[in-house]
Image (spheres, grey):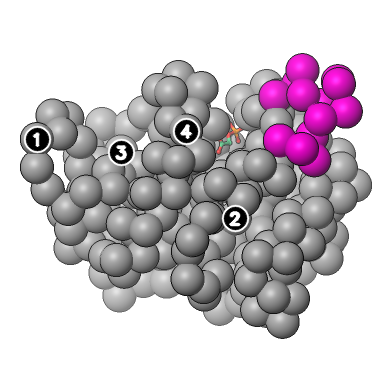
Amino acid sequence: MSEIIVAANWKMNKTVTESNDLVKEILKEVPVIDSVTCIVFPPFLSLPSVANLIKGSSIKLGAQNMHSAQKGAFTGEVSGLMLQDYCSYVLLGHSERRVLFGETDEFVNEKLAGAIEFGLRPIVCVGEQSSDRARGLTENVIRSQIKNSLKDIEGINDIIVAYEPVWAIGTGTAASPEDAEEVNKFIRDELALMFGSEKVLQTPILYGGSVTEDNIAEFLAKPNVNGALIGGASLSSEGFTQILQNACNLT
Ligand code: PGA
């Protein structure tokens, strides 16, 4: 596995000015990255200016969500066609979209087809609730999310998967690196059943949920954890550049 991905999900944080300031700080401090792919996911409104600021740098840009349709009567939504002018990645099926906005695997699957159509590299998020884990249902939940979110997709090609246990997101209680490795390996095995084992050897599978500069190295040391999706700790340039530095030091 050659690619390590460090992705910053800013969620609904940062005005346009604040986004610009943060990305300028990251650009100042960013280590020379060749072995790590760094992607930032600002709010929609900040995409144009951040896209401008990162031109010529190694930082990549992604959107936090998209609609599956190209255009039409979908008030408040943003399509892949609109996003492709600014970014090359898109987050799909984040647990906040699933839990707070009722997104189903079927909808995530439609969005995934849309992302592929518009040349956006998707990060498909999956993860169990704490009640699922307590009842020993983690694998059932993950299997069903993977199968249904990636249903009828022609190839695994550029798809990235992120395992984000819902109980670990924004709580300060990360999964153990061993638990993350176990679930990420399970995800790779499920993908292998769908797409063939050769095809999924290079599929990046990330871990997300309370990742910080203090624990990133332990996660990335695991063979099936090929990167991290970071929320809270990506909102300060100091924290995030330290995370990047720690990831670079491992390669
Ligand atoms: P967190 O969020 O790092 O704040 O836990 C991760 C995410 O939601 O992607």
Rate crowding at label 1 as few (under 14), some (14 to 19) or many (20 or more) other CA atoms within 10 Å: few
Q: Amino acid at mark 4?
A: Thr
Residue at mark 4 = 104
- State which region is magenta: 129-141
Outermost residue on the front side: it is 152
Q: Amino acid at mark 3?
A: Pro
Chain-order first, disc 1 or disc 3: 3
Foreground: disc 4 or disc 2: 4
Residue at mark 2 = 161
Q: Amino acid at mark 2?
A: Val
Marks 3 and 2, how far apart at CA: 21 Å
Residue at mark 1 = 73
The C terminus lies in quadrant: bottom right
Chain-order first, disc 4 or disc 3: 3
Q: Are marks 1 and 2 in contact (CB under 8 Å)?
A: no
Q: Taking the image as drawn, is residue 242 in sight?
A: no
> What SS does tag 1 mark?
loop
Residue 131 painted magenta:
yes
> What SS does tag 2 mark?
strand
Residue visible at 52% across and 48% down? 149
Residue at mark 3 = 43
Q: Amino acid at mark 1?
A: Ala
